[in-house]
Amino acid sequence: MTSNLKPYNLPQHRRLAEPLLRFGSVDETAVDIHPLRGLLDYGPFGKLRISSVPNPIRVAFIGQKAMIGRLKHLFRELEGKHRPRERRDYLPEYPGFTKIFGASLAAAGDEMTLELPDSIDDQLKSATAPHRVLAETLIGALSSLRVHQHSFDIIFLGLDEKWMMGFEGDENDDFDLHDFLKAHSASAGLPLQIIRGGDTNRALDYSCRCSVMWRLAIAIYAKAGGIPWALANTRTDTAYIGIDYAIRRNAGADNRFAICCAQVFDSDGAGLDFIAYEADDIRIDRSNPYMRKDQMLKVMARGLAIYQRKHAGSVPARIVVHKNTEFRRDEIDGCLAAFSNVPDVELLQVQRSHGWQGVLFSQKGKADGYPSHRGQVMPLGENEALLWTQGDIPTMTPGNKAYYKEGKGIPSPVLITRFAGRGDFYNLCEETLALTKMNWNNDGPYTQLPVTLEYADILAQVVKRMPKLDARPYPVRLFM
């Protein structure tokens, strides 16, 4: 280090404003950057849509006798008031499910409560493959409820920590109980909320009940078909598509398929459906799968059909595709062929791992109190930029105090690289930043990646465990 270093201007550097969210009011000014505060002030976006969710939302229960008692206690907690014990600068008081969403919760009939026998415990202890025994038992319970599918809207399934030996497979069996259950419930069209106990970090035992209620309430509302919030400022007639892949491990050559998941979002980020494409001839390069032109064309054409089905057959004026690996020439050609009638197509790689890092310094040449501000953009070239989707958001809290969601550490930017398109690159970064606020499976102000890739990753992991992969659209809410 030398003592005569001078600060240098970064003329292309910008800090983007925190994106606004829209809620349940026709008033154009009824927006907020804070998702929970917006829900309290204006109600959910879904109330603007006819019959978006049932009222009441009926809940069925699966678990052993003691677990069902705990699930029903949790269910009753959802209508109570809770004050935050953590994240007090961000987390508002929880006033109760009905007051937030305008729809109440109700326990489905007694026949919708399925009590599992206590003998399961001994069966798991003696089984050579306890994960398979537990999975078969729970799938059987879900199948029993399926015949009464019109009598409930969501299932609460309780998993006790004493069953931990059945949550994952061994090194020769790529098994995850959560994903396995989601795969089967989604195949059957059953909205499922898995709830674990026996651990202080889980919903049943977590100390801050306010935090638990917010997260669970938002997830329930979304799984019941509601839209908690949407993006306020996006270009109309735009479709956002996220792509991810999954490979079945420990499988033979005939069924070691690579699975591509693509989900389509409206211009407001509110979400539509997703489709999956299964193929046995996908190239693998450094552990990353890549598709041929015809394969990518088929996936993108199906994605476009999802959008058209929900928009009276109209074609979007613009499509933005997100992928976490580079677009190869064949994939680019496949996308452009599928979207030949779309005037504006943007193909973007959004990388979480890339080696770039940055620290914010104040004007006095000292490291800032917070290592980064969320929304910073640092262009690296005409079609490449670093975007900080994590960091301090002072406008998120009362009094504009600093709010750093991660709490500690230096946030890494995402690296955005464009492979096709001609739009303003700062606008693309603004859209990407906005889409980090659209994951309804948590109560936080943002996630690191846009929801297109957050959901695509989850979907890919679940879909590879689906018993049968039909060539049809699936509602994203079934996989949350």
Image (cartoon, rainbow, N blue to C red):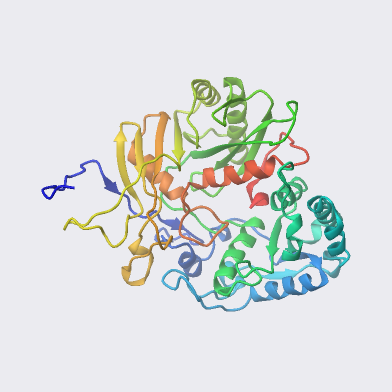
> Looking at this rendering, what residue extends furthest in the front direction?
1
Q: Residue at x 61, y 78 (%)?
A: 80
Residue 250 x %, y %: 72, 36
Residue 12 x %, y %: 24, 41
Would residue 33 be found to the left or right of residue 24 on screen?
A: left
Residue 295 x %, y %: 62, 24
Q: Residue at x 73, y 26 (%)?
A: 253
> Looking at this rendering, what residue extends furthest in the left direction?
4
Would residue 178 be found to the left or right of residue 283 on screen?
A: right
Residue 153 x %, y %: 73, 60
Q: Residue at x 46, y 70 (%)?
A: 87
Q: Is residue 160 visible?
A: no
Q: Residue at x 26, y 44 (%)?
A: 13
Does 294 sit above or below residue 300? above
The one of 358 and 311 positioned closer to us in this rendering: 358
Q: Is residue 77 visible?
A: yes
Does 423 sit above or below residue 399? above
Would residue 382 be found to the left or right of residue 347 on screen?
A: left
Q: How many marks?
A: 0
